[in-house]
Amino acid sequence: MKSSQLVAIIKRLEAMQEVPADGEPQTRRFEKMGLKKALSRLMPRHKHMN
């Protein structure tokens, strides 16, 4: 895997850390040549959780 591909993946995962207004979990699909290789879901943290 090229480092440029890793940078793109890391940027997509970092973008998931932004809490959406609706509070719904964010999901990202990672595909290669149209085939799903991975699915990542981030549950937003609530302010009262550490």
Image: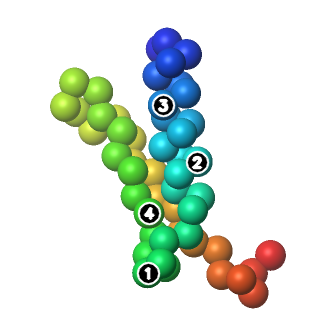
Q: Which mark is residue 26?
A: 4
Q: Secondary structure at mark 4?
A: strand
Question: Could you tell me the amino acid type at mark 4?
Answer: Gln
> Given contact means CB atoms under 8 Å apart, are the residues at marks 3 and 2 in contact?
no
Please, which residue is most extreme toward the front here? Answer: 21
Residue positioned 80% across, 76% down in the render? 50
Q: Earlier in the sequence, mark 3 or mark 2?
A: 3
Q: Position of residue 45 (x, y in %)?
A: 64, 74
Q: CA distance from mark 1 to mark 4?
A: 10 Å
Q: Earlier in the sequence, mark 4 or mark 2?
A: 2
For disc 3, the neighbor class at 10 Å (few under 14, some 14 to 19, many from 20) is few
Residue denoted by label 3: 8
Numbered badge on residue 31 = none
At label 2, counting other C-alpha atoms closer than 10 Å, the crowd grade (few under 14, some 14-19, many 20 or more) is few
- The residue singled out by tag 2 in the image is 14
Q: Nearer the viewer, residue 16 or 21?
A: 21
Residue at figure coordinates x 48%, y 43% from the top left: 12
In the rendered image, the residue lying farthest to the right is: 50
Q: Quadrant of residue 18?
A: bottom right
Q: Secondary structure at mark 1?
A: loop
Q: Residues within 10 Å of mark 4 (few under 14, many from 20)?
A: some
Residue position marked by numbered label 1 in the rendering:
22
Left or right of 46? Residue 18 is left
First-in-chain label (3 vs 4): 3
